[in-house]
Amino acid sequence: MKVNKRVILMTPSMSKGGAETQLLKIASFLKSKHHKALIISLKPIDEFNGAIRKSGLEILFLRSWFRYPFSNISVLYRTIKRFRPDVVIAFMFIAIIFARLLKLSFKFKLISTIRISVIPKKWYLAFKLTQRLDDVIVYNSFASMLNFEKQKLVCKGGVVIHNGITIPKYNQNADDVGNQYFKWVCIGHFRWNKDYLTLFKAIALLKHRNFTVDIIGDLNGELWPHKTIEELEIQKHVNILGFKQEAHRYLGESDAFVLSSFSEGMPNAILEAMAHAKPTVVTDIDGNHELVEKAQCGLLCEKQNEQDMANNMLKIMDMSAADRLALGSNGQLHIKTRFSEEQVMGEWMQLIDRLAG
């Protein structure tokens, strides 16, 4: 007889990032299979603006830790005691540390999931001291797993479960929408690791060419991007469009994808671009390298090197349409065989069943 599972998914916040997107996909999948899922956000940050509760998912947002530290601890303790989880899945380092400490008081199985190859210094000691409390460690890339095992930051062997990606049924090409210029798309909020400055400088090196770059991502209150665009005189080449719920539409209408990050785990944006059969120009960092090398779907450039990025963007623009299509098709095949949502959610369910069995 099938036994319904009780699963808590814990995260630092509900920002609109790749990890949070995957968390929501897992929670929705569990709910669709009639399991009980509760999301706990350690901070009162909801960039989904209430859409999570509207979808029928149960979620708890803790309050400001600066103002309500003891109240938050009490609420967290009482919630877990009431919910009685079979399994807790903790996303990202601070949530992993919290979940490990809570496991000392409650008998749940803990899956710690690591989404990036490098741990910030501020979490290093607490993470290392509590490493023995994990039951399973899940990485979303082999690069992350190898880095953490090499640095002896984990004492258990891990498993890799990729990000689950929706495969579009139809690939829209530039010819379908009648573009008169080459159209790049970049997806990512303006955060420290995205290194948009390098992308802007690369665009400035190519401003004699006829192309645009649509940037889909929240400015997060930053003023420097528009100022830099003006200083580099690339206004006609760059469109900062802000966050868009339907980012896939912009991917469908583009010719290629570009991303200038100097730190990533297994970036959803690149995976989505590959799913839409778009050739990619991305920085040569762990997760990106793993994807592009295996799939042969684009070009890698040295991080924080605008000349290298510009050269690779130029190579893609000067390729024949057939060559770009071949790169894009390679990427889409790679996603279909390793990252499809059906396959990935099945892997999560198998792991949860094994631990809670």
Image (tube, grey):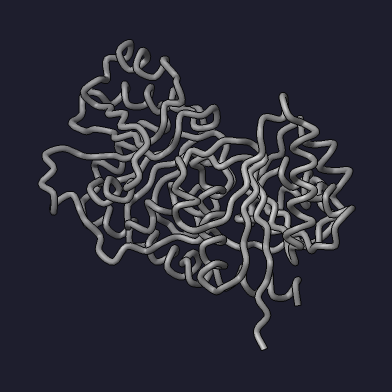
User: Going 25% across and 20% down the picture, which residue do you hit?
Assistant: 235
User: Going 85% across and 57% down the picture, which residue do you hit?
Assistant: 106
Quarter of the image where the C terminus is located? bottom right
User: Taking 280 as reference, is 333 above or below it?
Assistant: below
User: Going 68% across and 66% down the picture, which residue do you hit?
Assistant: 6
Location of residue 292 in the rendering, given as x and y in whole percent from the top left corner: 47, 52
Q: Is residue 104 left or right of residue 202?
A: right
Residue 312 can be seen, yes or no: no
Residue 15 can be seen, yes or no: yes
Q: Name the foreground residue: 91 vs 37.
A: 37
User: Taking 127 as reference, is 328 above or below it?
Assistant: below
Q: Name the foreground residue: 277 vs 351.
A: 351
Q: Name the foreground residue: 221 vs 225.
A: 221
Count of marks overlaid on the render? 0
Location of residue 71 in the rendering, given as x and y in whole percent from the top left corner: 76, 35
Q: Quadrant of residue 62?
A: top right
Q: Name the foreground residue: 107 vs 336.
A: 107
Work out which residue is located at the far bottom of the displayed protein and give it.
1
Quarter of the image where the N terminus is located? bottom right
Location of residue 60 in the rendering, given as x and y in whole percent from the top left corner: 62, 47
User: Going 27% across and 15% down the picture, which residue do you hit?
Assistant: 233
Location of residue 320 in the rendering, given as x and y in whole percent from the top left corner: 21, 50
Q: Quadrant of residue 325?
A: bottom left
Q: Quadrant of residue 125?
A: top right
